[in-house]
Amino acid sequence: PDSLINIAIDGPAGAGKSTVARLAASKLHMIYIDTGAMYRAVTWKVLSTGLAAHQIEEIAQLAETTEIALEPSEDGQKVFVDGVEVTEQIREPYISQKVSHIAKIPSVRNRLTSLQKQMAIHKGVIMDGRDIGTHVLPDAELKIYLTASVEARAKRRYEELKAKSHEVPYEQIVKEIAERDHTDETREVSPLRQAEDAVVLDTTGLPIEAVVHRIIALAESRMTSAQG
Ligand code: CDP
Ligand code: CDP
């Protein structure tokens, strides 16, 4: 069998984490886990229950009793909340606008972090998020910090939404991404930060295939040394 390693990919919104992690996972025969989807799933549950982000106690309780499940699929993964599929719904802009405020609640992070650690226990996992290399999988054999300029990241989101006939003004996307970066970088519990031992890849102007290629090369060299 392939030598088993875990790969942690962190970085801000639109850096290309989920796209390249999914492609690399399929080439390396590893399991892809999108932890952002788990925070989005909790946010979906909170908002559909009618709670607001400041109702911390109620949200903590809700997070504790909500069942979040991920299931690998053709184009990534399906997401279920209490058995109901929410894969599409959790990508809606109203979720993107609130998710970082739910994700900063310590009890929500504790719950999801422990689920994520469980998912990686047998190795062979590529996990993307904000705190994977720093908190969730501090022993991952390979850590990547993907980044790109805020303009490049906003342009990608703009194109993505436009392709789904959901046109949002570019300026608004820049503003929302910058706000979310700020909330993620300044929260008290496990903020978005580059792990000391992470390989930094700036993807501004870099095609997806080039990034994937680089990650695969790094992964293969770590697999060899893990075998060693
Ligand atoms: O795909 P996009 O970059 O827009 O975001 P995401 O990966 O789906 O993550 C959505 C939000 O969840 C982030 O902005 C963070 O607030 C939070 N998150 C987190 O706090 N920790 C993680 N490991 C993953 C996501
Ligand atoms: O997961 P994250 O928020 O970091 O980014 P993503 O959802 O993987 O990527 C956002 C968009 O940027 C997608 O539509 C990708 O196809 C695109 N992308 C790109 O144009 N060039 C890259 N090097 C990486 C992603």
Image: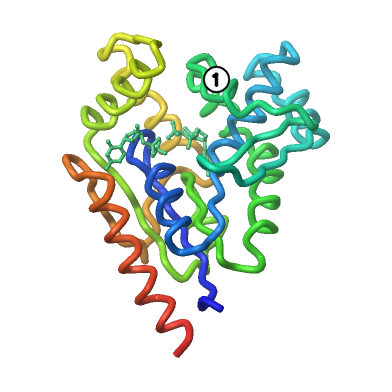
Secondary structure at badge 1 equals helix
Which quarter of the figure is the N terminus placed in? bottom right
Q: Residue at x 40, y 42 (%)?
A: 19
Q: Where residue 200 sits in the image (x, y, percent)?
A: 28, 56
Q: Residue at x 34, y 10 (%)?
A: 168
Q: Residue furthest left?
A: 205
The quadrant where residue 124 appears: bottom right
Q: Where residue 64 sits in the image (x, y, percent)?
A: 79, 37
The quadrant where residue 11 appears: top left
Q: Residue at x 50, y 67 (%)?
A: 140
Residue 223 to residue 158: above or below: below
Sort mark 1 into few (<14), some (14-19) or many (20+) by Cα contacts within 10 Å: some
Q: Where residue 23 sits in the image (x, y, percent)?
A: 41, 51
Q: Residue furthest right?
A: 65
Q: Quadrant of ligand 2?
A: top left
Depth check: 123 or 101 in front? 123
Please indicate whether residue 29 sits to the left or right of residue 13 in the image.
Answer: right
Q: Residue furthest bottom?
A: 228
Disc 1 marks which residue?
A: 95
